[in-house]
């Protein structure tokens, strides 16, 4: 029992570090396995080359990329907007790259830096595995590049919006959203979460844009994007994102860790404590939770009851098979209520497996949030088209906007177990909404998803991922917060 309280706190850190240890210095077998899914996709169907080469040619922004300058901070009344607009205008090559890349099959950025263009590596357009035996965590350097491109795409949207070129503005914005949709198909959980979270955020920015220019939006443009553009962020998508793949790369990494740590097991399956402790506990010199423990001794003690290589690999397969079945089913399926293979797994005997797949539930949660964001953005665009077409008035019920302004099938809420549709209400008075940014006031009409609690909270509370209260889609919360002075 001495080990149990400590194990829960350290396993996630250990596996993140030691998993990458097995791939130290470009482990050829692991890198090849991670890159295998891309082999059948032609270079012309990968967007990475076009996007990253265009990024290398961009001029420096007037504000350094980061928390103070990214897709969420850009709008036409931001500080130094004039400089940001000029920067966006001076980099048409990136806009052309986004338009050219939007219908690529995948992003297609390879894992590892061996053979990669040195200019890409220098700029951070890479996925590296570290450069030493004690510093070999997989690092998705390219996230910063994608965020920088997002700042450009948002700036260009607003620049074109200020010029009244709304068709061109949405063309750039939707092209970037499609590239983010490609990022969502990368192979690792970390990448999947990055892609999903940034796509959800980006679609909220599109709705900010609609709100800012609501009284100028052309009806035809709003019909076009609602009926023919947002519905094809990926050509094979539907209102339930059924083609979105579950991340598989983490299974490859964990299998490599198991192989190295348990390969010295004897013929009876007993784990070699010294080998196990050396592999899993070798990172004790790193800063982090392991620093305060005698990790070598701790892992020797765990090794006594840890499953063999064969048993651990079987458990890994069973856990992923269970996740795959659930991934293909809607949240309302009875199967989703059953105990998972992971929950039935002994956390000590199969500690490495348990630690590796624990966070996969976050991918399920963000998938539902993105489904709500995509469908809600389609509905919002359609409602804006209706609003402009009917002398700046919102429909009394959403059915009036079906077919002509947006497709009925995209009025879908993945959280709603009964009706299955997004909530809509035309407002006769303003309504308060409590958000992470503070209290805001909605006017006109409201669209929301009921959130992860599957209960309609009447849009009184909003969270960006739907984890608390509802997920308010329209009016856009960020734009309302700016009106209230909660954001600059």
Image (cartoon, rainbow, N blue to C red):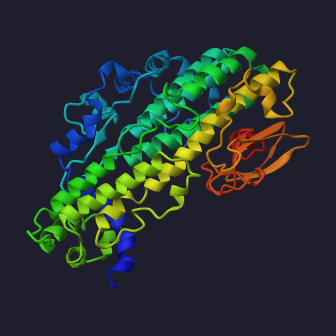
Instruction: Residue at 71%, 39% (x, y): give it.
Output: 476
Vertical arrangement, residue 285 with respect to residue 231, above or below: below
Instruction: Residue at 68%, 15% (x, y): give it.
Output: 163
Instruction: Residue at 65%, 58% (x, y): give it.
Output: 453
Count every numbered label the image shows and give the total.
0
On screen, residue 372 versus residue 41, left or right, reads right
Vertical arrangement, residue 321 with respect to residue 395, above or below: below
Vertical arrangement, residue 124 with respect to residue 402, above or below: below
- Residue 69 in sight in this render: no
Query: How far across and down, in percent of the image, does residue 440 sit?
Result: 78, 48
Q: Nearer the viewer, residue 267 or 49?
A: 267
Query: How far across and down, in percent of the image, does residue 100 sit?
Result: 44, 16
Rendered image quadrant of residue 82 = top right
Residue at the extreme bottom: 1
Quadrant in which the C terminus appears: top right
Q: Nearer the viewer, residue 411 or 161?
A: 411
Query: How far across and down, in percent of the image, does residue 48 sit?
Result: 36, 27
On screen, residue 44 versus residue 31, left or right, reads right
Rendered image quadrant of residue 385 = top right
On screen, residue 485 versus residue 196, left or right, reads right
- Residue 473 in sight in this render: yes
Query: How far across and down, in percent of the image, does residue 441 sit?
Result: 81, 46
Instruction: Residue at 55%, 21% (x, y): give it.
Output: 172
């Amino acid at each position: 029992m001495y080990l149990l309280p400590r194990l829960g706190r350290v396993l996630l850190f250990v596996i993140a570090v030691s998993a990458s240890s097995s791939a130290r210095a470009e482990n050829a077998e692991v890198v090849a396995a991670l890159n295998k899914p891309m082999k059948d996709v032609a270079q012309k169907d990968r967007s990475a080359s076009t996007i990253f080469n265009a990024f290398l040619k961009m001029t420096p922004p007037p504000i350094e990329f980061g928390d103070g300058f990214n897709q969420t901070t850009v709008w036409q009344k931001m500080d130094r907007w004039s400089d940001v607009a000029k920067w966006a205008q001076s980099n048409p090559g990136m806009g052309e790259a986004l338009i050219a890349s939007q219908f690529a099959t995948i992003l297609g950025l390879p894992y590892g830096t061996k053979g990669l263009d040195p200019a890409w590596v220098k700029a951070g357009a890479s996925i590296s595995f570290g450069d030493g035996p004690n510093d070999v965590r997989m690092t998705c350097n390219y996230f910063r590049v994608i965020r920088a491109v997002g700042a450009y795409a948002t700036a260009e949207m607003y620049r074109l919006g200020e010029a009244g070129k709304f068709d061109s503005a949405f063309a750039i914005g939707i092209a970037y959203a499609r590239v983010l949709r490609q990022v969502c198909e990368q192979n690792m959980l970390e990448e999947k979460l990055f892609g999903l979270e940034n796509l959800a955020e980006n679609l909220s920015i599109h709705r900010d844009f609609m709100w800012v220019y609501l009284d100028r939006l052309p009806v035809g443009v709003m019909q076009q994007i609602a009926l023919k553009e947002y519905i094809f962020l990926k050509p094979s998508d539907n209102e339930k994102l059924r083609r979105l793949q579950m991340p598989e790369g983490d299974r490859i990494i964990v299998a490599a860790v198991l192989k190295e740590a348990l390969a010295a097991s004897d013929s009876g399956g007993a784990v070699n404590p010294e080998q196990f402790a050396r592999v899993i506990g070798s990172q004790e010199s790193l800063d982090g939770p392991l620093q305060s423990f005698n990790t070598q001794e701790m892992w020797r003690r765990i090794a006594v009851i840890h499953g063999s290589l064969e048993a651990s690999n079987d458990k890994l397969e069973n856990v992923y098979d269970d996740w795959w079945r659930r991934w293909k089913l809607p949240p309302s399926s009875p199967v989703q209520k059953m105990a998972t293979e992971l929950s039935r797994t002994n956390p000590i005997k199969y500690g490495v497996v348990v630690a590796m797949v624990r966070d996969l539930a976050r991918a399920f949660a963000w998938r539902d949030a993105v489904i709500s964001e995509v469908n809600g953005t389609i509905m919002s665009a359609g409602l804006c088209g209706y609003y402009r077409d009917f002398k700046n008035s919102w429909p009394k019920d959403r059915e009036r906007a079906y077919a002509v302004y947006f497709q009925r099938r995209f009025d879908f809420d993945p959280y709603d177990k009964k009706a299955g549709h997004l909530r809509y209400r035309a407002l006769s008075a303003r309504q308060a909404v409590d958000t992470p940014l503070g209290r805001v006031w909605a006017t006109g009409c409201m669209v929301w998803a009921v959130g992860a609690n599957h209960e309609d909270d009447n849009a009184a509370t909003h969270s960006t991922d739907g984890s608390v209260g509802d997920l308010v889609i329209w009016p856009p919360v960020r734009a309302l917060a700016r009106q209230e002075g909660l954001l600059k």
